[in-house]
Each structure stands twice: as structure tokens, then as C-alpha cells.
Image (cartoon, rainbow, N blue to C red):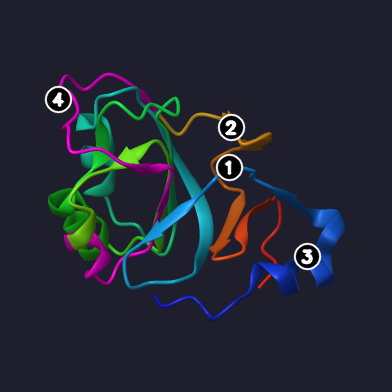
Amino acid sequence: MVPEPMKTADLVDAHDALVSLCDLPWRRFGRVRSFWGPVATVQCFEDNALLKSCLRESGNGRVMVVDGGASRRCALLGDQIAAILRASGWAGILINGVIRDSAEIDAMDVGVYCLGTSPKKSGKGGAGRSEVPLRFGDVGLQPGQYVYCDADGVLVSDEKLL
């Protein structure tokens, strides 16, 4: 499923009362410049085993939203897991944390918004929770909400706006 094109600025203009800004210093990687879809969540800290497992499920155009506690010590996504994201049909991934293999990911047909990069890999113990409410960037994110990501920012809405 390829989502229809959108601009977050247009969404704010048309639906300002229905959107909340996820206010963090996002960096974009991958050839998919903007994406949107229903939210799926993973909360994990410096351990990406649960995230990898969840991304193996069919994405069906959803956006994986990951709360990594804003850790910059180790990456929650690398090129191998980004390939799983693409193959499983996820619209994109939003990570409150960092990635590695950024040059390779930047050349892939994926959409990734994160806080930055680190060459260090994460733990593989499986710690974390999925499909739980998250809060970062002064906004709550819950499974079933919608997230909209582009170069201007990240918006969250309870409703599908496109």
C-alpha cells in the first residue's frame, strides 16, 4: 500500500484543531521523504529484539512508533532491520532514539525519522513492550492513532485526515 502524498503544513492548515505536533529534532533517512498511517508502538530501551520481531509482522501501511527513551548510546535500527521494515509493508518508522548504517538506510526505499545516529548496536535481550501508549515530544502516541511525517515535522491525530 502506497499512501497518498501529503504535507504536514497542509494538514495543519486544514485540521489544526485535530493535530498535535511531536516536537523533537527529527532527522530523516531513506528515500521515502514523507509517510503516514495508523500507529503501532514499541517501547524499548537500548534493546531492539522486540522491535525486530514486531516489524516482521505485516505492516499493512502502518507506521511503527518506537520510544527508545531518547537514548543516543546505541542504535535501535540498522540496515538489516530496515530491510525487514520495507519487506513487511510498513509505511515508515518514527524512533525516539538513533539508528546506524545510516548511509545504507538513506539509499533504501524506506521512511525513517529518528534523533540521529550511533555506530553502536543495541542489546538483543528482548526487553520492552509493544502496543502500549507512549509519550515523547510533548505528545501522546497510542496504537490506532494516525501519525504524519515529512520534512516539516511530525503530527499526531486521533483521526485519519487523508
How many residues crowd around disc 3 within 10 Å: few (fewer than 14), some, or many (20 or more)? Answer: some
Residue name at image x 82 percent, y 70 percent: 13
> Label 4 belongs to which residue?
124
Mark positioned earlier in the residue sequence (1 or 4): 1
Count of marks overlaid on the render: 4
> Label 2 belongs to which residue?
136
How many residues crowd around disc 2 within 10 Å: few (fewer than 14), some, or many (20 or more)? Answer: some
Image x and y of residue 132, in percent:
50, 29
Image x and y of residue 50, in percent:
25, 31
Please check the rendered image and state whether residue 140 is part of the magenta-colored stretch, yes or no: no
Tell me the SS state at disc 2: strand
Residue numbers of the magenta segment? 104-129
Q: Which amino acid type is marked by label 2? A: Phe
Mark positioned earlier in the residue sequence (4 or 3): 3
Give the overall secondary structure of the magenta segment.
Answer: loop
Tell me the SS state at disc 1: loop
Image x and y of residue 34, in percent:
49, 70
